Image (spheres, rainbow, N blue to C red):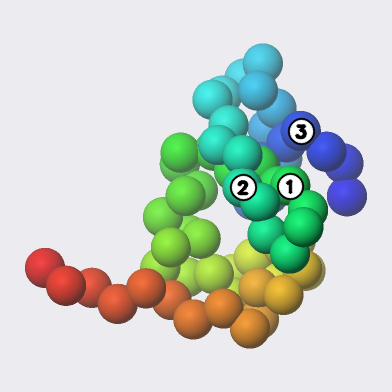
């Protein structure tokens, strides 16, 4: 996987602001547009974020 790009759309920080994540000792980046995917539908990141299949979506509390 190339580094310094969004996990989901693979855009770099020269195109879009990236949020740095730390997970299982490794760093990943995600853009604000795809942060909701990580929060609510992390299984969509399977194959991109190691262990994403183990993650459970956040529940809505609105
Ligand atoms: Zn993205």
Mark 2, other Cα within 10 Å: few <14 / some 14–19 / many ≥20: few
Marker count (numbered):
3
Q: Nearer the viewer, mark 3 or mark 2?
A: 2
**Residue at left offset 23%, top offset 73%:** 60
Seen from the viewer's position, the closer of residues 20 and 30 is: 20
For mark 2, what is the residue? 21
Contact check, label 1 and label 3, Cβ < 8 Å: no
User: Looking at the image, can residue 13 be seen?
Assistant: yes
**Residue 22 point in image, percent of width and height:** 66, 51
Asked whether mark 3 and ligand 1 are closer than 8 Å, the reply comes as no
The span from disc 1 to disc 3 (Cα, nearest Å) is: 9 Å
- Of badges 1 and 3, nearer the viewer stands 1
According to the picture, the residue beneath numbered tag 3 turns out to be 4
Inter-mark Cα distance, 3 to 2: 11 Å
Helix, strand or loop at mark 3: loop
For marks 2 and 1, give the CA distance.
Answer: 5 Å
Under 8 Å from ligand 1: the CB of mark 1? Answer: no
The residue depicted at 50 percent of the width and 48 percent of the height is 34
Secondary-structure class at tag 1: strand
- Can see residue 9? no
Mark with earlier residue (3, 2): 3
Residue at image coords 87%, 41%: 2
Q: Earlier in the sequence, mark 2 or mark 1?
A: 2
On the image, numbered disc 1 is attached to which residue? 27
User: Which residue is more in the foreground, 22 or 19?
Assistant: 22
Rendered location of residue 37, percent (x, y): 47, 59
Residue 62: x %, y % from top left: 11, 68
């Amino acid at each position: 996987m190339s580094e310094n790009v969004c996990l989901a759309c693979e855009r770099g920080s020269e195109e879009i602001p990236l949020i740095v994540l730390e997970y299982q000792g490794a760093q990943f980046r995600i853009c604000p547009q795809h942060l909701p995917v990580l929060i609510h539908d992390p299984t969509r990141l399977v194959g991109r974020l190691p262990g994403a299949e183990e993650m459970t979506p956040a529940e809505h509390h609105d």
